Image: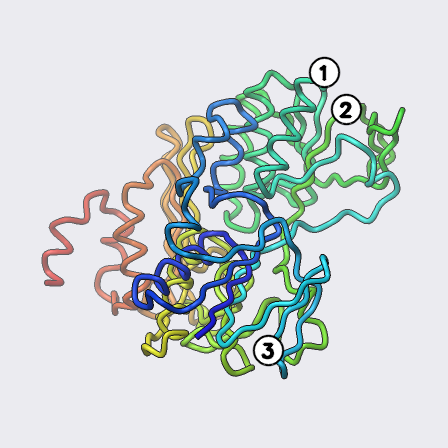
């Protein structure tokens, strides 16, 4: 048996380790456009801030591939694939066959299509090389940065640059930061916290063009006609599943690769996991891309079992995020901003003095979403209740008011 894994992120490595643990003799091949051993992608912003060194974010030893007897094609990009003949073709001209294939290529950052976007010192923050290049720019004298996008990547980039002593402004088109994972109240609290710590947050702003000098960015023209000086730009306008090589392959795709409860694609013996997989979602009860680390890890393991012929049903993903924003702790999961439909009920409580905020979203009598600010210690219990889809008809107000769930949970045993 020949197993081929495209991608060496957490989904890919969890799959490889599961395959090798059970099948000690078959061939495992891994292709990755990054020429490195596996590392923790969520930690790359700490390279920018200077809080971690490169070696500290690696999560496997130098001899990782050799120990697991994995054949590698590192620093290689897949150009296209021939499903009928079970081959992938690399940009280098090489081809690789497979018996079972896992696509775990992750996501690519969205590219800005404006004049000057190809100038020097305009970066993404998606991988380790991006972080290293941003640090080099800072060390070479960059002093005024703009970060485009108010999502998690944008915040992490801004935080890292601020820690390096760079003057940073965040430009966002939405009315508040983290608009994809926060609601209005929590978004406003996050914005105030960012501004209190010296980050200028400009809402309703976007870049129409970049200006350059000697091949490097020196300014940006905004949608309101304003011009701002900058010598460093980080673009964090979201990501899309890395599936361009699947064009005309016959693999069914929507936003990502559509997979079933076994993480199988529409083509026999082709599986998908991680940021590229559009898989069953627990609360929405349809297929979604939930591009977060724990989801990718679990999907990688489940896909591997099914590749081995060991039936494993993927229970579904649950989108959630937790992040510390200076002195503010934020956590959200499930359905944050529900559709305006009668079957949804929203309960919330806000303590202005302590800056504590809790929002619970119910679909009929089941908890399907939550937002927590400065009370994230309650998040684990709430996420479990969301995943279990318990009937909470008599406990809604208690869930909202309680800070300690221990005694309440004993009644469920």
Q: Residues within 10 Å of mark 3 (few under 14, many from 20)?
A: some
Which residue occupies 58% across, 50% down? 74
The disc, 3 or 1, on the residue closer to the chain's N-terminal end is: 3
**Quadrant in which the C terminus is drawn:** bottom left
User: Which residue occupies the foreground of this view, 278 or 94?
Assistant: 94
Q: How many marks?
A: 3
Q: Would you say 35 lies left or right of 283 here?
A: right
Colour setting: rainbow
Q: Which residue is at 33% across, 65% downward?
A: 24
Q: Is the C-beta separation of discs 1 and 2 under 8 Å?
A: yes
Kindly state the secondary structure of the residue where label 3 is placed: loop
Nearer the observer: mark 3 or 1; the answer is 3
The answer to whether marks 2 and 3 mark residues whose Cβ atoms lie closer than 8 Å is no
Q: Position of residue 295 (x, y in %)?
A: 42, 58
Circle nearer the viewer, 1 or 2: 1
Q: Quadrant of residue 217?
A: top right
How far apart are labels 1 and 2 at the CA level? Answer: 9 Å
Give whichever of discs 2 and 3 has the lower sequence position: 3
Q: Which mark is residue 141?
A: 1
Q: How far apart are the two marked residues, 2 and 3, measured between alpha carbons?
A: 47 Å
Judge left or right: residue 77 versus residue 163. right
The answer to whether residue 71 is left or right of residue 350 is right
* Whole-percent x, y for residue 165 in the image: 60, 16
Relative height, residue 411 to residue 164 (above, below): below
Q: Which residue is mark 2?
A: 231
- For the N terminus, the quadrant is bottom left
Q: Residue at x 47, y 69 (%)?
A: 3
Q: Earlier in the sequence, mark 1 or mark 2?
A: 1
Question: In what element is the residue under mark 1?
Answer: loop
Q: Which residue is mark 3?
A: 86
């Amino acid at each position: 048996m020949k197993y081929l894994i495209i991608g060496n992120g957490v989904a890919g490595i969890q799959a490889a380790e599961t395959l090798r643990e059970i099948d000690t003799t078959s061939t495992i091949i891994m292709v990755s456009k990054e020429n490195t051993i596996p590392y923790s992608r969520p930690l790359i912003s700490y390279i920018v801030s200077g809080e971690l060194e490169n070696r500290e974010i690696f999560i496997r030893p130098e001899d990782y591939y050799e120990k697991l007897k994995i054949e590698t094609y590192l620093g290689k990009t897949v150009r296209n694939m021939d499903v009928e003949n079970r081959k992938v073709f690399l940009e280098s001209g090489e081809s690789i066959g497979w018996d079972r294939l896992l696509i775990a290529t992750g996501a690519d950052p969205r590219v800005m299509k404006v004049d000057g976007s190809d100038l020097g010192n305009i970066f993404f923050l998606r991988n380790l090389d991006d972080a290293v290049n941003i640090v080099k720019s800072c060390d070479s004298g960059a002093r005024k940065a703009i970060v485009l996008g108010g999502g998690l990547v944008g915040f992490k980039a801004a935080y890292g640059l601020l820690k390096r002593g760079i003057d940073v402004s965040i430009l966002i088109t939405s009315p508040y930061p983290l608009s994809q994972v926060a609601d209005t109240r929590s978004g406003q609290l996050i914005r105030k916290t960012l501004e209190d710590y010296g980050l200028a947050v400009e809402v309703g702003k976007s870049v129409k063009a970049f200006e350059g000098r000697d091949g490097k960015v020196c300014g940006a023209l905004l949608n309101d006609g304003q011009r701002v000086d900058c010598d460093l730009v980080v673009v964090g306008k979201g990501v899309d599943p890395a599936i361009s090589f699947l064009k005309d392959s016959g693999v069914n795709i929507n936003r990502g690769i559509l997979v079933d409860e076994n993480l199988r694609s529409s083509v026999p013996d082709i599986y998908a996991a991680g940021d590229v997989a559009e898989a069953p979602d627990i609360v929405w009860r349809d297929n979604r891309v939930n591009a977060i680390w724990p989801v990718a890890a679990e999907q990688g393991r489940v896909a591997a079992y099914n590749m081995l012929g060991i039936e494993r049903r993927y229970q579904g993903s649950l989108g959630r995020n937790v992040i510390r924003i200076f002195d503010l702790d934020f956590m959200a999961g499930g359905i944050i901003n529900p559709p305006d439909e009668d079957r949804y009920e929203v309960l919330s409580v806000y303590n202005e003095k302590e800056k504590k905020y809790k929002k619970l979203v119910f679909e009929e009598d089941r908890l399907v979403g939550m937002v927590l600010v400065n009370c994230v210690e309650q998040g684990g219990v709430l996420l479990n209740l969301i995943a279990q889809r318990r009937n909470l008809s008599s406990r809604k107000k208690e869930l909202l008011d309680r800070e300690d769930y221990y005694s309440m949970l004993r009644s469920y045993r």
